[in-house]
Amino acid sequence: MRTRHPLTLLLAAVGVTAGYHRILLEHTRWAETMWNPATAEYRLWVRSSSGTEPAATANPALYQSDSFAFTVVLGNAVPLRFGTYDADLAGVPRDVLRQHTVDTIAHYAAANRWVDARGTWGGDVYWDSTFESYFAAAAKLMWADLDATTRVNIDKMIQGSANYVVSIGTGNDPKSPGWTIPGLAGGYEGNTKEEEMGVRTMPLAAALAYLPDDPAAPRWREWLTRWTTNIAGLPVADQANPAVIDGHPVSEWNRSHNIYDTFAAENHGSFSPIYQESAETYPGRNTAQYLIAGQSPPPSQRRLPNGDELDTTLLRLATDSGVSAYPMVADRHHLYGREVLPVAYSAVVRGNPDAARAERMLLDHLDPYLHYPPENRLTKFGSAENLGAYEPEARSELAMAYLLRYGRDRLGGGAEPVGTGTFFKDVGSVTNHGTEMGMVAQQSPGALAAAVPKPGFVKFAWLPEHDDWFLDPTAGNPSFLPSTSLTVSDRTAHVYRRVRDGVDASAPLLRTSSGFAGFTTLPDGSVVYATSGLAAGEGAFHVFALNMPGVRGLDGDRAFTGPGGAVTLAPGNADGGVDQVNFPAASARYVRMLGVRPATGYGYSLYDFQVYGGGVDLARGRATTASSVSTGYEAPLATDGDSSTRWAVSKDDRARIDGSNPIDVTTSGVVLSDGPATGSAGMVVEARPGQPAADTERSAADSAPSGGPAALRASLAGGYLSLFDLSGTKISGAWLTLPMSGDVRLYRGTRRTAPGGTVYQATVDAADARVEPPRFTLSGTVPALEATVADAQNLTLKNLDTGGTATFTVHTADDADRAEVTLAAGEQRTVHLGGTRLTPVADLALTKTTFPTSPLPAGMNDPDLAVDGDSSTAWRPGTWRSRRRAGRATPAWPT
């Protein structure tokens, strides 16, 4: 057998690499809580399978039973093998950690079922084989410290696991009840099979890396390629892809359908970024094995079909933490430790400079995240019910991310990061993910916005300045709309792209059981919300008010300032503790607590409902009522001054509480604090990211568009005209007054100007919304005028004055061209201006997805260059020889 050398010390650990090393050391404090001194090894389970904590453990938390605590050894091996070991950071001397690691590897290598059929772990594909692979990587890094018997046992485990994966072919693993896979067909609706296919690659990659001369190696490699290339299978793309991987084109390897054709993945019934990241996570884990073994990873681990496109989708939804927002999934969000490896893989192996910036943004957040209670944990928040079950895996993945960074010269060097401003410019986009996945999203330099009509997640999410820790869009948290449980009976959605339409924007509108609501997203990150008035609680958001030093805005509370004064949201609102809300004093007859969304399934309960004025609790002893009461826990008990009594919602009402069925508690004769807004008919809300308070006040004082039928609502936020028809009837030719000072902006359609104001003729389809960018501006002395704009280059002007002659200047919206126009009274003239791009155009192919997708065949450049609207770019097919005749087709792309 040829000798394979472990990963050698090629590079000084600096920057991101050093950051990973430091966090691994600090996380060692948590890893050591898994040490069982009674048996002298790390525990098998983070929590025992019987549901009780094992004796003699230093860790009192509750954990699930499939987390293989002992695989923390991979996270031990990296700081033991590389860099400078800092015992103060790790909380344990180096020689002690080394002994813990070696003893644990020896024990669990002997206890693996591929070594001993009576063993305590291993032998299953789901998910033992994943942890066998982590364990193998740790053992190979510590190889020089292991005895001969342990080395033999490790190789037996690696070989047995790989052979078993090959032996079951595309069938299900009979040892893993509950985990099924429909062969290579996969699945994408509701539950992608990315992860189920990815897990089968790990034993194969480990075996090929460490046992390359085994007689079974050719079969291992064949199945490694087959399962890896199918992870992100999309037939419409793959069957058009002649790129060769391991001797065969993608079109021959791939049979699965695991993602939507907008390059997004669902799991647990909704869009799930952490599962979509499987297309990077599994090749990342496998690549680390090859680096440890001193081998180059095979093409299948570096050229994943549709991988670039899946990566792009996530970047287009990125927050300032460098990872995707989670506007739907009810768990597995804000699990930063589980997202390091896929981002590192994209930056290092794919060489994506935007991913390299995202990696640094994530690392900047990971350090304060690690120190937020519970301290020294890499996973929190999104899967609280697991309470640390992901820690061993997160530690292993962080160690592998370190190895990718450390060995990046063997992988082509990786990418240098772009600047943060460039990053959000690069990933700017507008995407309609269709009705099945249910999301229209826009990434802009100023904000991330997403309209979600998906049942159970209905919201208009908005993350100003891409802040991952300000407004919480996850799961059932409301955003603009009163409840994520709204029933959406219909939706319209338009996306606009600058190349085709002259603006990057979106305009979705939802028809619900209680009315209509629309949402436009604009190029600067501003959004406009219009509603017919849906329910109490409309306009509510869930706000993070945490104390996480090092993360922008998380200094313990949130202060909100408006013309009426300031309100401070105390840290930990709705956490079951004491919540204090401060507001300017005002005389009122009642104070109302409106419960919009409970923190738990137990609804609401109040021991004390206190309202202070002049240092006195004015609510004590006052008449108090509640819309829901549990017998023995009546509303007056919240204001009786006795902290041992309480009001509680009835058991029957616990299940029905949401934004459309709020619970209120009201007490009389005290200072008033307004609860969540109730949407009034025709309400229009404009939200602008990063705007100074003075500018916000000025904006609030500006006159709004007015006129037309009650269902017609409009906004001029950002200089763009947002139009909404909040009814089931089309609005045709309605005259809308557009307040405007200075130069006159002209939008597509007909506009009339006159001293003191202008009007615009609006036509909007039933239950629809539109965004119109300015096409021209008029400057100088503009007469009473009728202007009809056809597109960005052509307009017709008619002087409506009854006498005299007027001279003024017409500019294109970008001021690339202008013309002086002189019109006599009653005169009409058509004006054409060049110098600017002609938009809108009817070319449906512009900016659409083209095939083949990644990886491209040899010599081929990106086919998107044929539909980018840029005449200076061109698609080159390259030198591949396969040809295929295309039949007649009628495209039906969503606009």
Image (cartoon, rainbow, N blue to C red):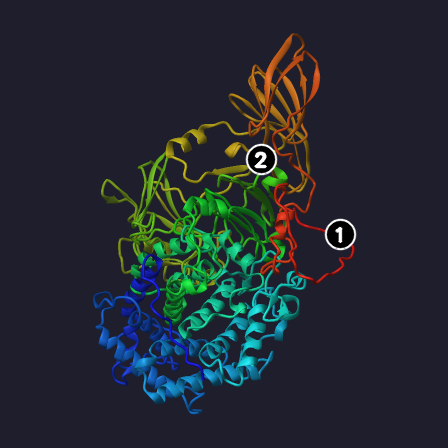
Q: Badge 2, how many Cα within 10 Å: few under 14, some, many 20+? A: many
**Res. 739 image quadrant:** top right
Instruction: Name the N-terminal-most of marks 1 and 2.
Output: 2
Q: Quick check: can you spot residue 664? A: no
Identify the secondary structure beneath mark 2: strand
Q: Nearer the viewer, mark 1 or mark 2?
A: 1
Q: On the image, numbered disc 1 is attached to which residue?
A: 890
**Res. 775 image quadrant:** top right
Relative horizontal placement of residue 91, taking residue 369 as reference (left or right): left
Relative horizontal placement of residue 47, taking residue 756 as reference (left or right): left
Real-space Cα distance between discs 1 and 2?
36 Å
Residue furthest to the right in view is 888
Marking on residue 18: none
Relative horizontal placement of residue 96, taking residue 333 as reference (left or right): left
Q: On the image, numbered disc 2 is attached to which residue?
A: 713
In the picture shown, does residue 397 fall above or below 866? below
Q: Position of residue 882 (x, y in %)?
A: 70, 63
Q: Position of residue 125 (x, y in %)?
A: 50, 79
Q: Position of residue 88 (x, y in %)?
A: 21, 66
**Res. 378 image quadrant:** bottom left
In the picture shown, does residue 853 fall above or below 247? above
Relative horizontal placement of residue 604, taking residue 740 as reference (left or right): left
**Residue 677 vs residue 12, the one in the foreground:** 12
Q: Badge 1, how many Cα within 10 Å: few under 14, some, many 20+? A: few
Quadrant placement of the N terminus: bottom left
Q: Position of residue 674 (x, y in %)?
A: 39, 42
Identify the secondary structure beneath mark 1: loop
Residue furthest to the top in view is 804
In the picture shown, does residue 540 fall above or below 259? above
Amino acid type, callout 1:
Thr
**Residue 731 vs residue 803, the one in the foreground:** 803
